[in-house]
Amino acid sequence: MNNTIMLIPIGYDVGLTTISLGLIKSIKEKNCSSIFLKPFLIKKNKENSSLTTLIIKQNKLSATINSILINKITDLKIKKNFSDFIEKIYEKYRNNKTKKKFFLIEGIEENKYLDNTNIELNLKIANEIKTNVIFVTDFKKNNSNHIEEKIDYINNIIQNNNKIKVQALVINKINNPNNIKNLINNNKNKKIKISNFINKIQKLSICKNISFIPWNIQLFSISLKKICSILHIKKMNIKNINLISINSITISENEKIPLNHACQMNTLFILDLKNRIHINDLCKKLNESVILLLNTNKRNSLYIQHYYFKKFNKNPSFLYSEMNTPELISKLKNIKLKKINLNTIRIKNIKKNISIYLQKIVHINNTKKNKTLPFKFSAIEFKYFLKKICSNLKKTILYTEGEEKKIIQSANICTKKNIASCILLGDPNKIYKTASTMNISINKRIKIINPNVIRKKYITRLIQLRKHKGMNIEKANHYIKNNMVLSTLMLENNEIDGIVAGIKQTTANTLIPPFQLIKKNKENSLISSIFFMLFKEKVLIFADCAINISPNEYQLAEIAIQSANTAKKFKITPIIAMISYSTGNSGKGCSVEIIKKSIQIVKKSHPDIIIEGPIQYDAAINYEIGKIKIPHSLVSGKATIFIFPDLNTGNVVYKAVQQSNNLISIGPIIQGLKKPVNDLSRGSSIQDIVYTTAITVIQSYLN
């Protein structure tokens, strides 16, 4: 079980803070420390912390992580921001998660401006982080139909999100009075019988691990100052009004005064002076922590104080109001019980009382992961993995097409995230003008190089490298005008660590200069390309989709071996499917025979590589189809590398899969060169460019 919990609130004001505090206490009682994260915070928040975070910090209950700041709550409704939000949260989670600490995430509450977007975003966060989920709802209305609707809603969420790991359901505030009228002693508040309620909910809920938390008046209060403000009460003989909280209200509007309430702490005792004959009895019993409210004028209040209180040597705090008792009750009924008091003693009580009900749903897992299972990246994990490695490498990457909008945006992101030190090759005036039209401020750490200023510097070296091909001063002056040639010479001279290009030019135009000037590694007879295809739950490698048009069996085998080596470098277990229109012996043809021969070549030179084919794409990617078409396969449904028989097939399939699934596809990543030069598809998104840059950084380190 995962030692990470996310609380997902279902409903408004469900008492999320009290549940978080109770969980932190329960975790501590199991000898485990915790880390707390509230994902988002509006920038205008004066405390710069959520209520829960503030309480935790002030009382030193747990380690906390700073929230992501947003301008306004409706920013969370913009779905195009979802992936960026979730990525930032995932980074915070991974940067702070340790094996020894329990991680608690308090989800986004319901808000009238969000239209249930909070539920969608909470579920996406839980799914990406792979956290256990505890749904938190309440029973404020004490209405069985109301809670049944909530349970149905939670059941639907569980059924429609089968990848969410539901750990428990918390139903909070059972028999909650909701507002202050139900704290008044003469109000007959209808309460439900908890045992009947529990049995009913257990039957209705899909989640059977349920914690039922009754509402406890001792945990909540309302400040006396707020009551005075609402009722326009005059203060007499009262000190430190800001520190006084009220838990209950007693009204003596009948003939007999309820004397048992006169000795309860934190009680507001409203004394109707029609009952003056019983004041002697009251004064005998009166606890001085009780606050008296007299419905009379100042003159009568002073009389009561001097005649009765002094007679019995009492000095209670008291107030007066010239409203009659019915008016006072009417105004009191409109005061809502919402905020919890940040009093240290009250926080202690909340932790203690709530944690009792949460013990059974908190589980600390100390078992080690099974290391025999192959590790599998999700898309968000792979992106985090790339950024984390790059941030420590400090490599310099040059963008040949530095004047392009997407390149400028990508360079800004890469610089901000410390993926690379970026150089834009292009006319500085054009670059700044382009940035200005997009309202982008170019990061000061980005270097801009005007190619026209430096071209002559590389003429001599170009002639040396291509002299055997007849290169002379005249040809070199012409050839150096190509920015791809210039970039490659900078790489060859170790001025930069890698090149990313291709957003405005063909793959051939991008790769011919590096092939001529950088050349391939000695152990490779060819260069090839791969794409990292970032599916939600896995990362696959597709090859070759950009370079080799119609490879023979030896070339196909080398593409497979190069791809397996690349996979290992990026912690992907190589399981190779050699894709064809045929599976096993179901079909015949020239390309089928080439695939069969290439597999034999791979197995002979690299017996450790798992490789099968020919196999159709559906059998390779889907285990259920694979076990029908090719029983006992080691590859079907498990393949991580898909080798296509020719460029036509590879290019069509990668684009079809990318566009139909809205995937990030990183590449083409070039294999076999001495130094990294990576091509961009002309349809590359900004994310594609950012992560192609990250791959280039890592390649430069590995090379």
Image (cartoon, helix red, strand yellow):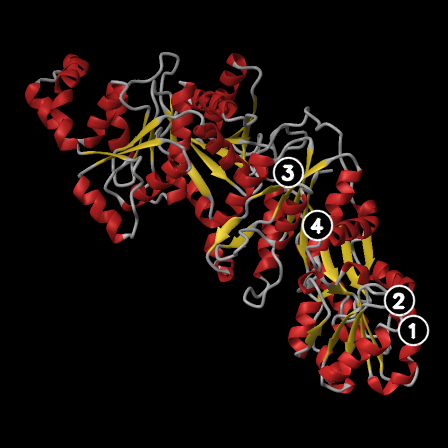
Q: Which residue is mark 1?
A: 259
Label 3 SS: helix
* Residue 208 position in % (x across, y down): 82, 53
Select label 3 or label 2 by which is in front.
2
At label 4, the amino acid type is Ser
Label 2 SS: helix
Q: Is residue 651 above or below residue 635?
A: below
Report how far apart the C-alphas of labels 1 and 2 lie in the structure.
8 Å
At label 2, the amino acid type is Cys
* Residue 211 position in % (x across, y down): 81, 54
* Residue 541 position in % (x across, y down): 48, 32
Select label 4 or label 2 by which is in front.
2
Residue 688, located in which quarter of the rendered image? top left
Q: Are marks 3 and 2 in contact (CB under 8 Å)?
A: no
Report how far apart the C-alphas of labels 4 and 2 lie in the structure.
33 Å
Q: Are marks 4 and 2 in contact (CB under 8 Å)?
A: no
Select label 1 or label 4 by which is in front.
1
Label 1 SS: helix
Give 322 or 332, whichever is nearer the viewer: 322
Q: Is residue 189 above or below residue 408?
A: below
Report how far apart the C-alphas of labels 3 and 4 lie in the structure.
41 Å
Residue 263 tag number: 2
Q: Is residue 576 left or right of residue 160?
A: left
Q: Are marks 1 and 2 in contact (CB under 8 Å)?
A: yes
Query: Which tag, 4 or 2, sits closer to the chain's start?
Result: 4
Query: Which tag, 1 or 3, sits closer to the chain's start?
Result: 1
Q: Residue at x 62, y 50 (%)?
A: 54
